[in-house]
Image (cartoon, helix red, strand yellow):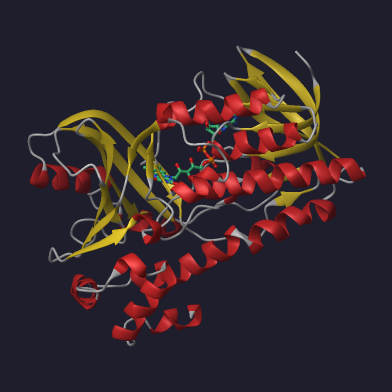
Amino acid sequence: MKNEYDVVVIGAGPAGSITAKTAAEKGLSVLLIEKRQEIGDPVRCAEGVSKVWLRKHIEPDHRWICADVKGSRIFAPDGTMIEMAEEIAGGEVGYVLERKIFDRALAYEASKAGADVMVKTRATDLIIENNFIKGVKVSHLGQSYDIKAKIVIGADGVESKVGRWAGIDTAIKPADIETCAQYLMSGTGIDQNYCYFYLGNDVAPAGYVWIFPKGNDMANVGIGIMGNKSGNGKHAIDYLNDFVNDKYPDAKILEVDVGGVPVCGSIEKTIANGLMLVGDAARQSDPITGGGIINAMEAGKIAGEVAYNAISKGDVSANALNEYEIKWRETIGREIDNSLIVKDTFVKFTDKELNSLGHSLEGVNFSSMSLIELLYALFKANKKLLWDLRILF
Ligand code: FAD
């Protein structure tokens, strides 16, 4: 086993694989490690992504696309339905992926670019010397190894430990995490051309239920509720059971997934001397939708490029890696901050207020509207309710 690389990436999700691919394409020696035996499995995701953003990173491939969606149908608590075209429905509507194959395809791209990949290899700690991260301690098939690196990338997802090991505060309060439960179901009978979202405090307190088509009459039926709303004997899975028993009593459950999504917005710091955090490890998922695949890939690309710049200049200090901090905050960071404002406004709404928002959108032509125009239309019709959103326009 090689024990020294330019870059070691911890975690082979979308963030890690794109970082590894980008850095390897630049000519750096890269190791991508993954604690699981199979990249992408088990899935903890509804698997929805925007087509346009995905294409920036990888050519769509029918092997990992389950559904090509035309738009969203959003239901207010009283059943009022709003239909939106895919282009404005947000970053999680477009393709529905098969992440078990997609994540592996991304890791393959990294390996093709020259990165070494090791599965069943868990990072157990960082090697730190004189306040600089100098590598990773790993456990692989019962043996422990030290692997040196000029830069370590923490791409270890929502349960990230790498940030904490490096002294970066990545702690999330229960109110800043959506706890999620999802079934892969057959027999829901939904129109496979649409993603469905159900709002309402009885259905999903401070969150929503989603139904994403997976082809062949299958669908991901899931729920995310705010962590501080889970308790008193009722958890995300209980709300999900209520929903499916009511709507799809005859549908069959083929898979169960549970997981958390950070919805806290940008954290203060994502770098240290010799280290960058990317994706869910850096809390870069969207606070309103909980979507994080595209942001993880975008951040991974920036991190791979910055790793190359820093190593080429022989300076991997936090000062040099600040280029990553600046670049991701100027791009996906802006979106994340705006989404946080929208989320903080929406989670306070009663069902009556959500219904009123739904009614104000009835008859609006969404096919020719951008998301910001849509928010503006909502704002104009509900100024008092949405006063906090005025700073977005
Ligand atoms: P991950 O995909 O979580 O990858 C991290 C990897 O690191 C994992 O493979 C893990 O095994 C590995 N790892 C962890 N610790 C170690 C270690 N110590 N050593 C080695 N490897 C390690 N996003 C969307 O865009 N669209 C959606 O529809 C969507 N739906 C979701 C539904 C649910 C129920 C949940 C929970 C999340 C959803 N998300 C969605 C969010 C999305 O799944 C994440 O934002 C995305 O996977 C983040 O990618 P990542 O690479 O940062 O982390």
Residue 185, placed above or below residue 342: above
Q: Is residue 179 above or below residue 215?
A: below
- Point out the residue furthest to the front here: 368
> How many marks do you count on the picture?
0
**Place of residue 307 in the rendered image (x, y in percent of width and height, measured from the top left):** 78, 42
**Going by the image, does 320 lie left or right of 251?**
right
**Residue 74, visible in the rendered structure:** yes
Residue drawn at point x = 54 percent, y = 50 percent: 295
Q: Position of residue 120 (x, y in %)?
A: 57, 18
Q: Residue furthest right?
A: 314
Residue 149's spot in the image, x, y percent?
80, 31
Res. 347 in view:
no
Locate residue 305: give its quadrant: top right
Residue 335 image position (x, y, % from top left): 53, 63
Query: Looking at this view, is 233 or 359 the one in front?
Result: 359
State which quadrant residue 387 falls in: bottom left
Name the one closer to the observer, 263 or 84: 84
**From this viewpoint, which residue is outermost toward the bottom?**
384
Which residue is found at the position 12% from the left and 34% from the top? 251
Looking at the image, residue 252 lies above or below residue 368: above
Q: Residue at x 74, y 33 (%)?
A: 25
What is the quadrant of the N terminus in the image?
A: top right
283 on left or right of 247: right
